[in-house]
Every structure is written in C-alpha cells, then in structure tokens.
Amino acid sequence: ETGVTQSPTHLIKTRGQQVTLRCSSQSGHNTVSWYQQALGQGPQFIFQYYREEENGRGNFPPRFSGLQFPNYSSELNVNALELDDSALYLCASSLPRDTDTQYFGPGTRLTVL
Amino acid sequence: EDKVVQSPLSLVVHEGDTVTLNCSYEVTNFRSLLWYKQEKKAPTFLFMLTSSGIEKKSGRLSSILDKKELFSILNITATQTGDSAVYLCAVRLSNTGKLIFGQGTTLQVKP
C-alpha cells in the first residue's frame, strides 16, 4: 500500500464526452504526477503539479488538463474523449525531500466507446 | 528524443531459476534510474539507482547501474511464482520530475 488513492477505479465513457479522474496523495506529498498507460505499454508522462502549479508536461494535447488543490489532492480532466484515450491512468506522488521516488496509486481504468 | 528500452519484452521461467532483466537508456540530463514491479495496477517501487557500479539489493532482487554504457540490470534469484509481474524501468531527468518509462518486461514464473 502506497497511501495514494484514485477514484473511480473503472469508468466507461463515449467519444466526445468529458471525464474527471481524482487522486489523493499521502500526507506531506506536495508533488503529484499523472501518467497514461496503454495496454502492453509503459506509463507515459502527462504532467506534474507542484504546490498547485503545473511543473512539466509531456506530449499530450491541451484537452488533457489538471488541477492540484491545497491539500495536495489532484484531478486530471480530459475533454472531447477519443477512442485512443482508453488506458489506465496512474497518479504518483512524492515527498518534497525525495522527489526521485514516486509512489503510484492503483489507477483508473478508462474505456472510451 | 529521450528513450528507455527494456529487454526482453517477455520471459517465461520455472521456479528457482535466476533471471536478468535489461534496461538501456538514451536521455539528456539523467538524474536517476528506477525499477518498479507492476502486478495488477499500481507500480510498486523496487530500487532507485544514481551511481554507477553500486549494487542495490533487497532479498532476492538486486540491481546495478552502468552510467558509462547507459544501462541497468535487475536480477532476481531463486524465482517464485509471486515474482510474476511486469517489471518497469524508468529514468528521471534532472530538470523535471518526469519519469520516462520503458515498455516493461513481462515475467511469468511457472511452478
């Protein structure tokens, strides 16, 4: 158990819809990163938040957006869903003094039909 | 373009065998290399390596980094069925918190 939780665990949407995924970090973890993991692939970095501000972004279009709240919980929003957005979405948090080690949540499995 | 490549992509062994998983990388601004085990969903942290030649060990698992040749290996001795999982290698860049993952190696340990 990493102490990182995500909700929901599974989600089914249709093309064009919008989705919000949530992540709660461990206490004191002020950095959160989001990853997309397609079937049979390694996770791909979407973006990272540090103290409520975006602190790095991967090669994802602007319809992927995020928020981090004062309690360090986080949201990932995806607009105009496409079939290829079907994946496992993972969030990972880290301590201020150990940002190399990222602790992953169990993920949200998103299926876009 | 930064990339991490793992090999083999999949491996089937029998209990008691020793396995070696490989991870090579080509990145700018290397900071550290991490190994994770992914059984169902959440990758769980195994090792973080920053210096060449220093072996990290945890039970039957060990790992080492070669920063000159740009690779790392993960060894598992006396494998057990519970070692069956996807093993992910990731590189952390020094100018960002971004982890670049390899494709993963799927290990199946048969009784």
Image: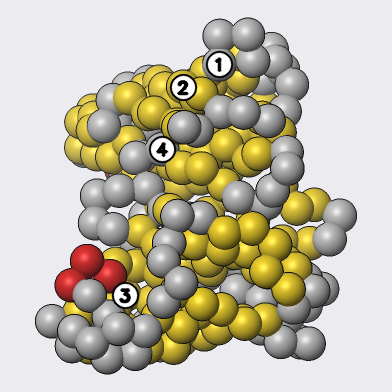
The quarter of the displayed image where residue B80 is located:
top left
The answer to whether one can see residue B107 in this image is no
The amino acid on which the numbered mark 1 sits, given as a three-letter code, is Leu
Q: Chain of mark 1?
A: B
Give the residue pinned by disc 4: B102
Q: Residue furthest top?
A: B68
Residue bearing mark 1: B70
In the picture as drawn, the residue positioned furthest to the left comes out as A113
Q: Are marks 1 and 2 in contact (CB under 8 Å)?
A: yes
Q: Residues within 10 Å of mark 2 (few under 14, many from 20)?
A: many
Farthest right residue in view: A97
Which of the marked residues, 1 or 4, is nearer the chain's N terminus?
Answer: 1
Q: Is residue B11 above or below residue A52?
A: above
Tell me the element at label 4. Answer: loop
Cα gap from disc 3 to disc 4, whole angstroms: 20 Å
How packed mark 1 is, by other alpha carbons closer than 10 Å (few <14, some 14-19, many 20 or more), is: some
Q: Are marks 3 and 4 in contact (CB under 8 Å)?
A: no
User: Residue visible at 55% across and 16% down?
Assistant: B70
**Identity of the residue drawn at 37% across and 48% down:** A42
Element under label 2?
A: strand
Compared across the picture, whether A46 is left or right of B85 comes to right
**Left or right relative to A76: residue A102:** right
Residue that label 3 marks = A109
C-alpha separation, residue under disc 1 versus residue under disc 2: 6 Å
Callouts 4 and 2 close, C-beta under 8 Å: no
Total numbered labels placed on residues in the image = 4
Which callout, 4 or 2, points at the residue further toward the start of the chain? Answer: 2
Amino acid residing under circle 2: Ser
Residue that numbered label 2 is attached to: B24
Quadrant where the C terminus of chain B sits is top left
Rounded to the nearest angstrom, the CA distance separating label 2 from label 3 is: 29 Å
Place residue B16 in its image quadrant: top left
